[in-house]
Image (tube, rainbow, N blue to C red):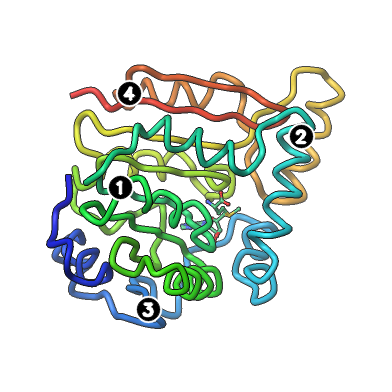
């Protein structure tokens, strides 16, 4: 369901999805709408700090994400093209959909969703990192998708959009980075319309005592959350999602569901 004129630049279309209070304080910077200004939300730890650096966005899409993803998903786990397919399937994306890519990084998934929603739809990438967003905006302009894809600098734990705005929300490789993942999930649920779909790719704790000991070290050193196997599935069900599906691979999981209502 596209909610604003498809002929306007995406950044103007995105502005119309904000709450009145957020629209009031949004400023346009470097091609995205900034809702945070100089004060970013509190960091969850070292990995999160890296995401704010200048260097990481330069290598993120080509090297960092595929390499770390491979280690985390395991040698037989899905590759990056498979991840895009899984996200699109879990969100059942179709022409005209309005989609939120939560913690979009350099827009590596955001741009791919644009092709599924066509020019009638709209994809919004939201991230806290200025450097990631600058790269996302540049790559989106190069891909000639500036009408279908717009970016917002905001906090996943306090989303600036009106309730029921989106047909689908994707949150890949980020729930485990948020200081309070359950607050972020509450916020994502609120901005989904009834019947809307969610797709999550995140961490999962190992089963063996050895793996679990390793997880505890990773968690402590990096600030990342390692979720128990049932936790994310239970959290979705508790928030009113049905048709909840989970696929485990390595120390990661893909989870999807549809908001009942
Ligand atoms: C590993 S990247 C994931 C990028 C992309 N979704 C992917 O799957 O490759 C994690 C992103 O989460 C963002 N992030 C972390 N905490 C955030 C928060 N509270 N609000 C918005 N974005 C956040 C980081 O800035 C970073 O760009």
Give the spatial CA distance, label 1 vs label 3.
Answer: 21 Å
Residue 26 sits in which quadrant?
bottom left
Occupied quadrant, residue 193: top left
Q: Residue 229, position in %: x, y?
A: 60, 21
Residue that carries the numbered disc 4 in the rendered image: 241
The residue under label 3 is 31
Query: Mark 1 vs mark 3: which is more N-terminal?
Result: 3
Q: Which of marks 2 and 4 is in front?
A: 4
Front disc: 2 or 1: 1
* Disc 3 crowd, CA 10 A, few/some/many (<14, 14-19, 20+): some
Q: What is the x, y in percent for residue 181?
A: 49, 42
The alpha-carbon separation of the residues under discs 3 and 4 comes to: 34 Å
Nearer to the camera, 188 or 142? 142
Quadrant containing the N terminus in the rendered view = top left
Q: Are marks 1 and 3 in contact (CB under 8 Å)?
A: no
Helix, strand or loop for disc 2: helix
Residue labelled 1 has its Cβ within 8 Å of some atom of ligand 1:
no
Residue 2 horizontal side relative to residue 154, left or right: left
Which label is found at residue 117? 1
Mark closer to the chain start, 3 or 2: 3
Q: Hey, which quadrant is residue 155 in on the image?
A: bottom left
Give the residue at x 79% y 32%.
75
Above or below, comparing residue 9 to residue 60 in the picture: below
Do the residues under discs 2 and 4 have CB atoms within 8 angstroms? Answer: no
């Amino acid at each position: 369901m596209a909610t604003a004129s498809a002929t306007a630049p995406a950044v103007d279309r995105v502005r119309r999805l904000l709450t009145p209070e957020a629209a009031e304080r949004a400023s346009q910077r470097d091609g995205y709408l900034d809702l945070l200004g100089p004060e970013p939300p509190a960091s969850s730890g070292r990995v999160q700090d890296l995401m704010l650096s200048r260097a990481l966005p330069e290598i993120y899409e080509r090297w960092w994400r595929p390499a770390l993803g491979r280690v985390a998903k395991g040698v037989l786990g899905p590759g990056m093209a498979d991840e895009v397919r899984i996200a699109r399937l879990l969100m059942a994306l179709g022409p005209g959909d309005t989609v939120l890519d939560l913690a979009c990084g350099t827009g590596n998934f955001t741009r791919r969703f644009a092709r599924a929603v066509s020019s009638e739809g709209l994809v919004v990438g939201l991230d806290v990192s200025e450097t990631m967003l600058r790269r996302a905006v540049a790559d989106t302009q190069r891909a000639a998708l500036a009408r279908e894809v717009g970016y917002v600098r905001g906090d996943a734990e306090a989303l600036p959009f009106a309730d029921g705005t989106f047909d689908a929300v994707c949150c890949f490789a980020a729930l485990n980075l948020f200081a309070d993942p359950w607050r972020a999930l509450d916020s994502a649920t609120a901005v989904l319309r009834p019947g809307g779909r969610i797709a999550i790719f995140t961490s999962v704790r190992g089963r063996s005592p050895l793996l679990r000991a390793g997880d505890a070290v990773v968690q402590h050193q990096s600030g990342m959350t390692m979720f128990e196997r049932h936790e994310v599935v239970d959290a979705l069900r508790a928030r009113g999602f049905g048709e909840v599906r989970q696929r485990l691979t390595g120390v990661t999981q893909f989870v999807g569901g549809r908001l009942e209502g």
